[in-house]
Amino acid sequence: MNNVEFGIGLRRLDSVAADARNAEELGYEFISAGEHVFFHGPTGNGLISLSAAAGATTRIKLMSSITLVPLYPAALLAKQVAALDLLSDGRFHFGVGVGGEFDKEFEACGVKVSERGARTDEALRVMKRLWSEDDVFFEGRFTQLPGVTLSPKPVQQPHPPVWISGRSEAAKRRCALYGNGWLPYMYTPEHLASSLQTIDGFAKEAGRSEPVIPGLFIFFAVHEDRDQGTKMAIDRLSVQYNQDFSKLAGRYAVSGNPQDCIDRLKEYVQSGARTIILNSACPSDYTTENERLMANEVLPALREL
């Protein structure tokens, strides 16, 4: 079985640089950052957070998890991704999502939530051309390019790895058409295995031969006391998503003591996951210990299954 890589999400907006250095020292292969313009609580901007992280680190890879692509003009986002890849010396991985959990942020940004999938698909076509071609002409539903050249281009060519996130059939098809990797969230191991089969089918329909890298985004809370770890995950996710997670955390998060977390993550690895982005689901004053326990007590048992 191939080696598994693990990443950690940047949770605290006021200590991005320090947290990024700590993640690198703990041996994580990725640091990640997500975004919302508006949500149920404080949120950052993934590209800005990862820019700060890039300046504070030298080796660890940087992943947006995820960038809300439909909220950006495609050409502007292509520029930002290229700039971040250059700033990080080719360490950036571009996580793509359509959003939709919070309609008000779409309304505030002047984007119809019903158009988010179409906007994302078109943006991916536009950005891939801008990253690898000169004098790009494009006439689309949302983007028109009058013969423009993006310069400088990304360090990674033809472009930084594109990770498609989501849960729907549309997201799986998008991954087969445009993604280098698949990064679903709120998935059970069974869902993950099934989704990889579906993506493989869509890829074959599209005539694609390059395999998709199977990944996963998942929340976690690890504590020497099993009940405390479980409670932290339930409490944090219930607040973050503004709903009761008491019956959902066991399915969609990793929690409990270190052995519980090893056992659950092993199920995801056995279902195909090779890149796992972990995001702390715990009080902010426990985040550092949560990430340390995961790195030192859980992940060594999983890296080379």
Image: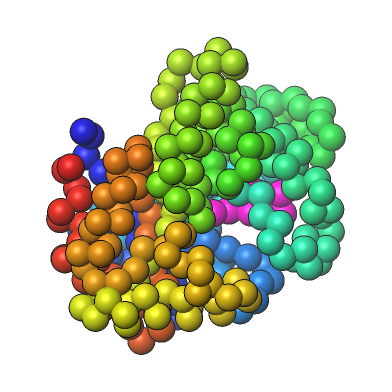
> Is 149 situated above or below 20?
above
> Is 126 situated above or below 233?
above
Q: Quadrant of residue 271?
A: top left
Q: Is residue 71 magenta?
A: yes
Q: Quadrant of residue 168?
A: top right
Q: Position of residue 196 (x, y in %)?
A: 46, 33
The residue under the point 38% across, 55% down is 277
Q: Position of residue 222 (x, y in %)?
A: 29, 72
- Does residue 112 show up? yes
Residue pushed farthest front?
247
The residue under the point 81% across, 31% down is 140
Q: Position of residue 296 (x, y in %)?
A: 16, 65
> Is 237 situated above or below 276?
below
Residue pushed farthest bottom?
285
Q: Quadrant of residue 250?
A: bottom left
Total marks in image: 0
**Quadrant where the C terminus lies?**
top left
**Quadrant where the N terminus lies?**
top left
The segment highlighted magenta reads 66-72
Q: Position of residue 203 (x, y in %)?
A: 54, 21
Q: Is residue 169 magenta?
A: no
The residue under the point 51% across, 66% down is 248
> Is 140 situated above or below 245?
above
Could you tell whether 50 is left or right of 242 in the image? left
The colouring scheme, among rainbow, by chain, secondary structure or one colour, is: rainbow
Could you tell whether 109 is left or right of 260 in the image? right
Residue pushed farthest top?
207
Could you tell whether 256 is left or right of 236 in the image? left
- Does residue 92 show up? no
Q: Nearer the viewer, residue 143 or 248?
A: 248
